[in-house]
Amino acid sequence: MPPGMPMPRLPDDLARYGGLAFQMAIPIGLGAWVGRILDARWEMAQPWWTIAGLLVGLTVAMMVVWSQFRS
């Protein structure tokens, strides 16, 4: 790299967005997991608790993303 050129920010951006991906995956996965447990516990014919858990997890994940980009 020539002297005086700024370093590329690619590693910083990859770390930021990679961390954001994990912050999104955890609430969605936890919501689905809890929903599956509730569906199995009450022997539901349709996976309504799983769907509800996914939606709650997705909502929490979007709130995390929103708060990260606001700051």
Image: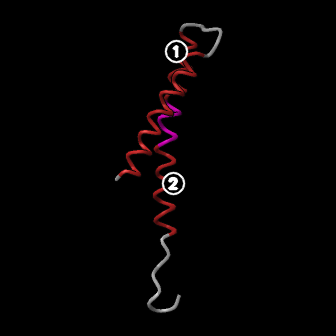
Tell me the residue at 53%/87% (across/down). Answer: 1
Give the amino acid at mark 2: Gly
- Magenta residues, as a range? 24-30
Q: Secondary structure at mark 2?
A: helix
Q: Position of residue 33 (x, y in %)?
A: 53, 26
* Callout 2 crowding tier (Cα within 10 Å): few <14, some 14–19, many ≥20: few
Q: Nearer the viewer, residue 38 or 17?
A: 17
Question: Magenta span has 29?
Answer: yes
Tell me the residue at 50%/55% (across/down). Answer: 17
Vertical relation: 65 (above or below) 58: below
Q: Position of residue 42 (x, y in %)?
A: 55, 7
Vertical relation: 33 (above or below) 43: below
| Residue pointed to by mark 2 | 18
Residue 69 left/right relative to 36: left
Give the amino acid at mark 1: Leu
* Callout 1 crowding tier (Cα within 10 Å): few <14, some 14–19, many ≥20: some
Question: Magenta span has 38?
Answer: no
Q: Nearer the viewer, residue 16 or 30?
A: 16
**The residue positioned farthest toward the right in the image shown:** 45
Tell me the residue at 58%/15% (across/down). Answer: 48
Question: Which mark is drawn over residue 5?
Answer: none
Q: Position of residue 24 (x, y in %)?
A: 49, 42
Query: Is the Cβ of the residue at disc 2 closer than 8 Å to that at disc 1?
Result: no
| Residue pointed to by mark 1 | 38
Q: Secondary structure at mark 1?
A: helix
Tell me the residue at 54%/10% (across/down). Answer: 41
Vertical relation: 17 (above or below) 25: below
Q: Main secondary structure of the magenta part?
A: helix
